[in-house]
Amino acid sequence: MSNTIESSLPSGAGAGALPGDRFDDGTGLKNMEQLIQLRWIAVMGQVATIAVVHFGFDIQLPLEQLAIVLGGLVAFNIVSHLRCRTRRRVTNTELLVALLVDVFVLTLELYLTGGATNPFVYLYLLQVILGAVLLKTWSIWTMVAVTVACFMGLALFSRPLALAFDPQDGLASPYILGTLICFALNAALLVTFVTRISRNLRARDAHLADLRQRAAEEEHIVRMGLLASGAAHELGTPLATLSVILGDWRRMPTFQRDPELLQEADEMQAQLRRCKAIVSGILLSAGEARGESSARTTVRTFLDDLVGEWRATRTLVAFEYDNRFGHDLPMVSDSTLKQMIGNVLDNALEASPDWLRLVAERVGDELVLCVADAGPGFAPEMLTQFGKPYRSTKGRPGGGLGLFLVVNVARTLGGTVSARNLEGGGAEVRVSLPLAAITLEGDPVGS
């Protein structure tokens, strides 16, 4: 079995977005749906209880009035269900109103069926506990005050119900039996729905922690970008000075008479031009065009040119490149995207100097790049921390930033990066980028 780890960012997540009061991951909506399910169970349970009490125990209940109350509860639940189908954010106030409606309906039913002497009066506790789990502090105390007031009102104004207490009869007593059913119902509903609601809240907290981690990583990238941009500015002057000096050296008689010196001077100038290109790329990524600007191209041409430039500046033993993209699409050559793909290739080359493979293909609406090598593969702890800064097995300061930048550039574009160890040895890094983020829409190739 292959070891696999994947890093991704939901499409549309803005860089540097911090979770706050406006953050919404759907937890409120999920909790409202739980309340709707609980309310349907309550309706069915109340219908069954009323039928058993009225016809089984021969205790007369105001069936018509109870039917009206239950009909209102059903109507409210249907409205709540339609509200949830809009998928809009559910606020704390809406949850409070929903729970208060449940308390109001329960109060009416208890008023018609014995008030405070009804053993099902303890269902108020269920509403309070649900409020304690779902609501903000002020709303919880509002629930407590309302339920206490309703209980007191039932004790003062409810209709009496002919229900013998008879504790000595044990479970044969309708009151004791009703209390037992109420306790079992409370316990079962609390275990079921509080567990589900707690799971929703834990999922929300985990998602918030993940967003905070991503925000910290993006802030780290911003700091690195500022540092790189400043360094590029500082390097511009000494590089220009070196270029002038090398030009003067090549014209000196000593160099003109010595072909070896002249060849070394040419090599130094080539490396100097490469340094200038790197500096220009850094400044271009920072929005400060020092050299050539981004050029219009196509996906296939962009990949072919990128691979050609990369191969020309590296010492390779065996490199396989397979461009299977298919129908070409227009795009703009982006230096950040070039650096990202170059980082993946450089990491693979360091792990496997003798063999490397790059396969580019179109899968649905995504550009998929697979870089495979014949190296030792990723250590298990590296796979679990894939894409985190300063996680590297190279043993040098600052290692691990290459893949960190790769993962975050892909996230910014709405894509994913995954890594796995191959069964026959070596490793594979898979980069998936949505075509909508890198291509020009509605513009045919060659126009």
Image: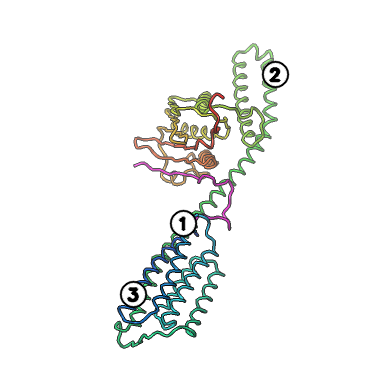
300 to the left or right of 279: left
* Quadrant showing the N terminus: top left
For the residues labelled 3 and 2, the Cα–Cα distance comes to: 105 Å
Amino acid type of the residue tagged 3 in the rendering: Ala
Pointer 3: residues within 10 angstroms few (<14), some, or many (20+)?
some
Mark 3, secondary structure of its residue: helix
Residue drawn where x is 45% and y is 62% of the image: 78
Magenta residues, start to end: 1-27
245 to the left or right of 210: right
User: In the figure, residue 19 lies in which quadrant?
Assistant: bottom right
Tag of residue 51: 3
Mark 2, secondary structure of its residue: helix
The residue mark sitting in front, 2 or 1, is 1
Amino acid type of the residue tagged 2 in the rendering: Asp
Q: Which residue, as the protein is rendered here, is positioned at the far front? A: 64
Tag of residue 203: 1
Q: Establish if 446 lies above or below 187.
A: above
Instruction: From the top left corner, tell me how far across and down residue 116 is, in percent.
Output: 44, 82
User: In the figure, residue 267 lies in which quadrant?
Assistant: top right
For the residues labelled 3 and 1, the Cα–Cα distance comes to: 40 Å
Instruction: From the top left corner, tell me how far across and down residue 238 is, in percent.
Output: 69, 29
Q: Establish if 427 lies above or below 239.
A: below
Mark 2 and mark 1 lie on one chain; the one further toward the N terminus is 1
Residue drawn where x is 47% and y is 36% of the image: 366
- Asked whether residue 347 appears in the rendered view, the answer is yes
Mark 1, secondary structure of its residue: helix
Pointer 2: residues within 10 angstroms few (<14), some, or many (20+)?
few
Q: Establish if 77 lies above or below 279.
A: below
In front: 165, or 412? 165
